[in-house]
Amino acid sequence: MKKWSMILAIVFMITTILAACGSKSDQASGNKDSKGSEGSKDQSFTIKVANYYAIDHPQNVALKEKFKPLVEEKSGGTLKVEIYENNKLGGEKEFYTGVRNGTIEMGIPGMIMQADVPKMGVIERPFLVKDFKHAKAVLDGPIGKEMTDELAEVHGVHTLAWTANGFRMVSSNREVASMDDFKGLRLRMPNTPVFVELGKALGANVSPMPLSEVFTAMEQKVVDAQDNPIGVVKSSGFYEVQTHILESRHGFTPNVLIVNQAFWNKLSDNQKKAVEEAAKEYADYEWKLSEENYESDKKFLAEKGMKFVTPNEKFLNEMEKSVQPMYESYYKEYPWAKEMVEKIKQQGN
């Protein structure tokens, strides 16, 4: 009897030990699965995207139709996008500062940062870029990368994509059809050295000011003319206070979609991939819209009564000649610039 009691006791002990080990194993496995699930779950964020364009501008159309839905879909709903167009979060300087400081997650400025990162301004040198195809090839290639390489270090922003603003022209309240017509013309330019210098080289009296102030300045006749691609003339309603457009195409201006670097670092690899893929599709779409819209914008503005002046070869050559001293001083100030400019020119050949 004692023998059987001892055997039963041993069997019970072994069963108890095996059950305990199994329980611990299941618990450990459960904890591992729980931790793995928790580790793979992306944190949710809302992304504010600020810009200075009107709601029907190609930038905001592309943001609404491509960037926002794609980011939200590709991130599995963990990222939400809010678009703040038309200076709702401040003018270019204000919202760019917001992105740098992290109070705004993303923005679409022009080349406002070129005072601190000079290479960002090379693409806007006068009469340098031929057409949209040329501009996109330059900006989406090694030159575009070289231009943005210092942005994260200097301003704490990460570049996602280059997009198009367009070829700059002069809209005015009177005809500008010769170099003489620039004399005495009170011309609004962006408050960027290259544009201020360009306006003066053409012979105009330059008044630097942000885009948000331009309509009122023209309406009150503080300025006679302003410089922008015609898409901005249309979307900002400048045709209400202007009568002529000189198709000078004196410079190309891009935009750049940027994100605060600290915010970018918070995103998971999956979320970063979602944003990057959405940014590419948005950018390609925006380039397409900007190029295609030129003729339709021109037709729209002509129907609103604006008269287009296409410069003849003589006038065009005179404008190009007037800005050549800008290149000479540019190369003296930035020794790297000449090689970069030549690379851009070669890519257009």
Image (tube, rainbow, N blue to C red):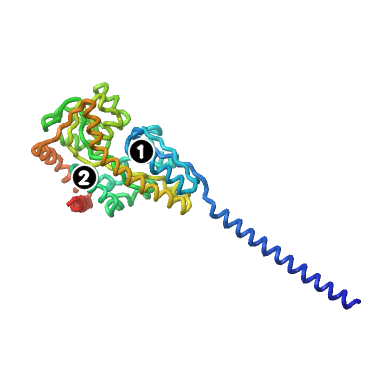
**10 Å crowding of disc 2: few (<14), some (14-19), many (20+):** some
Mark 1 element type: helix
Which residue matches tag 2? 131
- The amino acid type found where label 2 is placed reads Asp
Q: Residue 271: percent from the left, percent from the top? A: 46, 50
Q: Which mark is residue 61?
A: 1
Label 1, residues with CA under 10 Å away: few <14, some 14-19, many ≥20: some
The quarter of the rendered structure image containing the N terminus is bottom right
Indicate the position of residue 228 as horizontal and vertical percent values. 25, 35
Q: Residue at x 34, y 33 (%)?
A: 54
Residue at 20%, 33% in the rendered image = 170
Residue 290 at what x, y percent from top left? 28, 40
Q: Classify 51 as above or below 332.
A: above
Tell me the element at label 2. loop
Q: Quadrant of residue 186?
A: top left
Residue 83 can be seen, yes or no: yes
| Alpha carbons under labels 1 and 2: distance apart | 22 Å
Residue at image point 12% right, 31% down:
177
**Mark 1 vs 2, N-terminal side:** 1
Disc 1 marks a residue whose amino acid type is Val
The answer to whether residue 25 is left or right of residue 148 is: right
Q: Residue furthest bottom?
A: 3
Is residue 336 toward the left or the right of residue 59 in the image?
left
- Looking at the image, can residue 115 be seen? no
Q: Nearer the viewer, residue 140 or 72?
A: 72
How many circles with numbers are drawn on the protein? 2
318 horizontally vs 287: left or right? left
Mark toward the viewer: 1 or 2: 1
Q: Which mark is residue 225?
A: none
Judged from this view, the residue extending furthest toward the right is 1
- Which of 176/80 is in front? 80
Q: Are marks 1 and 2 in contact (CB under 8 Å)?
A: no
